[in-house]
Image: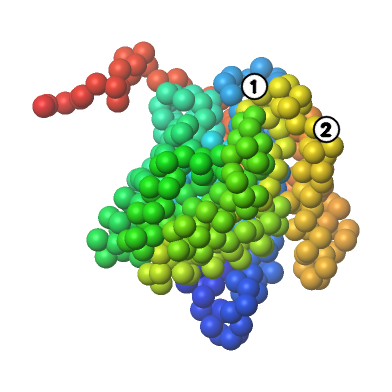
Amino acid sequence: MTPPSHGAAAVQKRIEKTGDQALPRQALTPADNQELLRQLYLARYFDVRLIKEKKRGRLRGTLYSSHNQEAIIVGSLFGLEPTDWISPIHRDMPAFFLKDARRGWRNPERNGMSIEEVCSQVWCKATSPGRARDNWSHIGSKTKRIIHSTSMLAGTIPVACGVAYADRLNGGNAVVLTYNGEGSTAQGVFHESINFASVHKLPVITIVENNQWAYGTPVELGSPSPDIADRAKGYNIPGLIADGQDVLDVYDKVMAAVARARAGLGPSIVECKTFRAYGHGDHDDDRAAKYRPEEEVERGRSRDPIAVFKRWLVEHNQMSADEAQRFSPEGLSASEVTDDDFPPEVVQYLKEGIEFAIQAPVPPAEEGSRWVFAEGPR
């Protein structure tokens, strides 16, 4: 198989060669599209496997499911350069190991975290970036160009602005993607940061994962407009709306914003309309079943991103109908799917990460005060 082409620069070159700048997806090769599908499978399997592990009693702590929102993570990351920065949130856990994954999932030189590092974080082991101080997404890496996430959504947008500003002062051409929920756009820090980015034309792209619910608050009680992208008008920047269930539409909109930012034209807001399959976290699943009508949940989950993309692949003769049916986790809950519903390489990759994490040691007790008090000479 021809290896997937890589990065925004390669995409732009192919666009220029074909002379067609209508849709960035048109520059993707069949191998690229197959890799997109593999990453969708991987993001889904990571989610359902962790849910199963917790039910088996092999995992503790809160899980924040990305089920039904995988197209946002995969589509937004796929066209980035290794030198670009990302700022994920709690529902983007697969982003940590999918960053720069086009260069090979096991490639030690790629600019993303390994599956072993991410699983170690989930299992609170010494081999995790956070050294067992959290079991979820409060991690980051300066060398991998991943901004540490926080529980306060929109709180990392000013950090993203600072990173972008510093990179520009140092002669770089990196773009920074920062992810946020729709509820966070009502905060003052959201306005202050994007206003600053717009004034200074910083290459910061704010991706809004509009899954219709900010914890238990519906979107209509947090925004006067049904389109969060309308907020961009106040900053004189583009506000794009993507179908969050369509990985190619997410890719198109994010790549358009990336090209604009890299050209020095400043930030954009990309709103990805999607739906949260479960509760805010697994601690909220029972409550979510009460504050969200059953018909709304069924409607929100009716367009599974894996099914949507496979349908496109079949329609464009890049996959046969039989091949599309071979692995079919779409439309199924975590309790309904099995390993047979996923490609073997996906199952094996995550198995390696989980088994590594389970066997890894916990940090020594003496580390309890590490990173809390000042260390070394003063």
Q: Is residue 278 left or right of residue 266?
A: right
Quadrant of the image occupied by residue 147: top left
- In x, y percent, where is residue 297? 79, 37
Instruction: Report the front residue among 202 and 131.
Output: 202
Figure quadrant of the C terminus: top left
Residue furthest to the top in view is 365
Is residue 288 shown to the viewer in this render? yes
Instruction: Report the front residue among 74 and 156.
Output: 156
- In x, y percent, where is residue 22? 62, 77
The residue at 83%/33% (across/down) is 294
**Residue designated by label 2:** 294
Quadrant of the image occupied by residue 102: bottom right
Is residue 115 shown to the viewer in this render? no
Graded by Cα atoms within 10 Å as few (under 14), some (14 to 19) or many (20 or more), the crowding at tag 1 reads few
Residue furthest to the left in view is 378
Earlier along the polypeptide chain: callout 1 or callout 2? 1
At label 1, the amino acid type is His
Tell me which colouring the rendered structure shows: rainbow
Q: Is residue 325 left or right of residue 273?
A: right
Instruction: Give the SS element for disc 1.
Output: helix
Against 65, residue 13 (above or below) is below
Figure quadrant of the N terminus: bottom right
Instruction: Give the SS element for disc 2.
Output: helix
**Residue designated by label 1:** 283
The residue at 84%/51% (across/down) is 326
